[in-house]
Image (cartoon, rainbow, N blue to C red):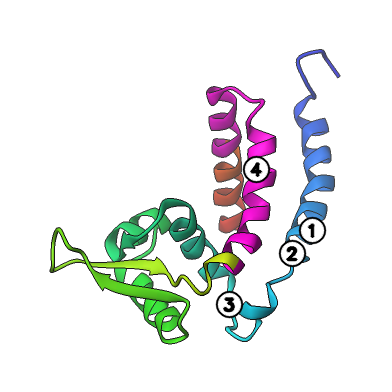
Amino acid sequence: MSTEGPGVDDAIRTMLLFMPRIVGRVKKIRIPDELQSFSLAPRHLSLLAYLLFEGQMGVNELAARLEVAPATVSLMVSELSRKGILERHEDEADRRRTLVSIADAHRPAIDSWLGKGATAWRKAFEPLSAGERQMFIDTLAAYDREIAQE
């Protein structure tokens, strides 16, 4: 291995060892007791994460960020609103627009649950330059695209 880093095969070997361990640890993150009965699925996690870290948003903005159709987000928002996890309210600036936010009653549980991952990512990303962070994100995105094709 050179001082610049591992060769491609060594990097692949390392990642093939890391990924199952990382996925296993993520799967073990326990859903808080107060959220257990809501049957939250992986598709809900990204939506909740955006609302938690970015604040209230419109359905179209959520759809764009999640890279899914607005109808898909509308269905998820309806489902989570019926369960009391999300709240919908009129945008004061544009009454035709509906904003979605996490219900105050569930915000602490969602924050403690998703916040653990955010803290871990912050510790991993802070020592990196902006370019290094972007390279890491681009690399994971490329891996995701390739895995999805198989």
Q: Is residue 3 left or right of residue 71?
A: right
| Marks 2 and 3 in Cβ contact (< 8 Å) | no
Q: Is residue 123 above or below residue 145?
A: above
Cα distance between the residues tagged 2 and 3: 13 Å
Cα distance between the residues tagged 4 and 1: 14 Å
Q: Residues within 10 Å of mark 3 (few under 14, many from 20)?
A: few
Q: Quadrant of residue 132?
A: top right
- Look at label 2 and name its amino acid: Ile
Q: Is residue 27 left or right of residue 83?
A: right
Q: Is residue 29 magenta?
A: no
Q: Residues within 10 Å of mark 4 (few under 14, many from 20)?
A: few
Q: Which quadrant would the C terminus be assigned to in this image?
A: bottom right
Disc 3 target residue: 40
| Residue extent of the magenta highlight | 109-138
Q: Is residue 86 above or below residue 93?
A: below
Q: Which mark is residue 29?
A: 2
Name the secondary structure under disc 2: loop
Name the secondary structure under disc 4: helix
Cα distance between the residues tagged 3 and 1: 18 Å
Where is residue 25? Give x, y as percent.
Answer: 79, 58
Task: Compare marks 3 and 4 and give the one earlier in the sequence.
Answer: 3
| Marks 1 and 2 in Cβ contact (< 8 Å) | yes
Q: Is residue 148 above or below residue 139?
A: below
Q: Quadrant of residue 111?
A: bottom right
Q: Which mark is residue 25?
A: 1
